[in-house]
């Protein structure tokens, strides 16, 4: 029952290791799961750049009708759809948005400084979520939600992305869930939605529809002096047939990009902040490194400066490894040919017929003690002090954005956001910040709704900021 509610993120790997027959477990009539604790190397077979595997349409149906890039089942169609936006999400293009990200980070820091002067307890989990929503909507739609301007960092609607992710799970089993929700009249939403999170979700949907219609009306050509949005890029893409450029496609693309770029990055920042503030040795090393770089500079530090800091990068890597931006399994299948699997000892080879779904689980790699000793320990130094041969192995199995042709589209956005936020927040406020009645459980993921979610009764990442704290 707990697994059906999305609880117990390690259910699959625990079940697999309870068996004594090897790394394969059949988890439903059409899918087999490979345990990455026993055979992590198979990850690079199943999710390689060259393997032309399709996504399991049933599993990814939670993301909509299959129009968006992330939900596209066919590998051939995915190549066209990803190609349509790959330049927009490239490292070179993403860097053009660094001033926008820095502006949002500056706004976050200013808000936190104001909270400090009022001696407030701040829930940084909410604050980080507001930041990531503002960044991703500014980048992809663009229609920034201005969540950072809310007095309470959107406390009343902090269940927005959690609710959206729950809908993904329900939609997978009942295809009418999302279409029915869109039919609920405004008066009923107002009457029953006491937290405001469902209203927020509906408002997001409306804003995406508006942005999609604008891109369609202007045929992908923004007004003079304005950069093309992601939706403009889609409209202008030669990789897509003109009759594919429809409202539903644009809305699903905007919805899924926003969802993917919000909770994952926010939860990673939250976990990083907790561990840095909790462990004095980690705290001192990070603040020393940041202070040496900043010197007497009072401006926010840029990406080109921060991305060269080894200990900061170690902190980010550990936060990504422990938070696991995707906690759902990633099912794939070959519709054209049989798939073979050989056990790590080389003694047994299994042949699965075409259309057999196979999956693996990111946390199995990140918590593999043979690759990451003391895997549940936040240890940034492991990325600096490890011998080169083993460090190479760590990087090989470090897959927070997955790998291969279906890896995370927004990896460059997420990396830039993590570096600029963590580096500047700790440089500006780190020495005046401390945890306030917050435990590790409050920031550790307990639910798998494809993305990781903290316990329902978590009090959040509460901190106090100020000289007197």
Image (cartoon, rainbow, N blue to C red):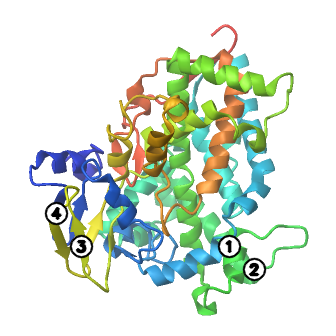
The location of residue 272, given as percent across then percent down, is 53, 32
Image quadrant of residue 353?
bottom left
Q: Are marks 1 and 2 in contact (CB under 8 Å)?
A: yes
Instruction: Give the x, y percent position of residue 145.
Output: 67, 52
What residue is disc 1 on?
A: 231
Closer to the camera, 415 or 448?
415
Q: CA distance from mark 4 to mark 3?
A: 15 Å
Residue density around tag 2, few if under 14, some if 14–19, many if 20 or more, within 10 Å: many
Q: Nearer the viewer, mark 4 or mark 1?
A: 4
Q: Quadrant of residue 348?
A: bottom left
Q: Is residue 430 above or below residue 130?
A: above
- Circle 2 residue: 220
Q: Residues within 10 Å of mark 4 (few under 14, many from 20)?
A: few
Rounded to the nearest whole Å, what is the CA distance between mark 4 and mark 1? 40 Å
Of 404 and 370, which appears nearest the observer?
370
Nearer to us: label 1 or label 3: 3
Left or right: residue 320 versus residue 347 is right
Using the image, determine if residue 302 lies above or below residue 231. above
Question: Secondary structure beneath disc 3?
Answer: strand
Residue at label 4? Answer: 26
- Which callout, 1 or 2, points at the residue further toward the start of the chain? 2
- In front: mark 3 or mark 2? 3
Seen from the viewer's position, the closer of residues 236 and 112 is 236
Secondary structure category for the residue under label 4: strand
First of labels 4, 3 by sequence position: 4
Q: CA distance from mark 3 to mark 2?
A: 45 Å
Q: Quick check: 16 left or right of 400?
A: left
Q: Which mark is residue 134?
A: none
- Provide the residue designation for mark 3: 340
């Amino acid at each position: 029952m707990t697994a059906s509610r999305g609880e117990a993120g390690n259910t699959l790997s625990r079940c697999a290791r309870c068996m004594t027959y090897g790394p394969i477990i059949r988890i439903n009539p059409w899918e087999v799961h490979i345990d990455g604790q026993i055979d992590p190397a198979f990850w690079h077979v199943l999710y390689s750049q060259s393997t032309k595997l399709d996504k399991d349409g049933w599993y990814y149906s939670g993301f909509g009708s299959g129009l968006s890039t992330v939900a596209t089942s066919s590998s051939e169609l995915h190549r066209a759809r990803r190609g349509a936006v790959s330049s927009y999400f490239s490292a070179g293009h993403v860097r053009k948005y660094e001033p926008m990200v820095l502006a949002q980070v500056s706004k976050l820091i200013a808000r936190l400084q104001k909270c400090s002067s009022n001696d407030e307890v701040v829930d940084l989990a909410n604050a980080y979520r507001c930041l990531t929503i503002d960044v991703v909507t500014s980048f992809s739609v663009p229609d920034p939600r201005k969540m950072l301007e809310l007095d309470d960092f959107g406390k009343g609607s902090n269940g927005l992305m959690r609710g959206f992710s729950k809908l993904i799970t329900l939609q997978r089993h009942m295809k009418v869930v999302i279409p029915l929700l869109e039919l609920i009249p405004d008066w009923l939403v107002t009457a029953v939605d006491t937290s405001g999170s469902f209203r927020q979700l509906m408002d997001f949907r409306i804003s995406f529809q508006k942005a999609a219609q604008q891109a369609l009306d202007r045929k992908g050509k923004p007004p003079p002096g304005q950069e093309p949005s992601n939706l403009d890029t889609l409209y202008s893409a030669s990789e897509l047939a003109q009759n594919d450029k429809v409202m539903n496609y644009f809305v699903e693309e905007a919805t899924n990009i926003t969802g993917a770029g919000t909770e994952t990055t926010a939860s990673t920042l939250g976990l990083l902040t907790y561990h840095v503030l909790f462990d004095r040795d980690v705290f001192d090393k990070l603040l020393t490194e940041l202070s040496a770089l900043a010197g007497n500079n009072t401006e926010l530090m840029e990406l080109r400066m921060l991305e060269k800091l080894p200990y900061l990068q170690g902190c980010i890597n550990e936060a990504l490894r422990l938070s696991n931006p995707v906690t759902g399994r990633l099912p794939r299948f070959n519709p054209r040919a049989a798939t073979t699997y050989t056990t790590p000892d080389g003694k047994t080879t299994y042949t699965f017929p075409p259309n057999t779904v196979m999956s693996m689980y990111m946390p199995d790699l990140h918590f593999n003690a043979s690759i990451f000793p003391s895997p549940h320990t936040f240890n940034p130094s492991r990325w600096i002090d490890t011998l080169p041969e083993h460090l190479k192995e760590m990087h090989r199995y470090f897959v927070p954005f997955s790998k291969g042709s279906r890896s995370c589209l927004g990896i460059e956005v997420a990396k830039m956001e993590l570096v600029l936020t963590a580096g500047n927040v700790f440089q500006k406020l780190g020495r005046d910040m401390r945890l306030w009645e917050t435990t590790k459980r409050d920031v550790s993921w307990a639910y798998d709704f494809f993305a990781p979610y903290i316990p329902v009764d978590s009090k959040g990442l509460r901190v106090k900021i100020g000289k007197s704290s």
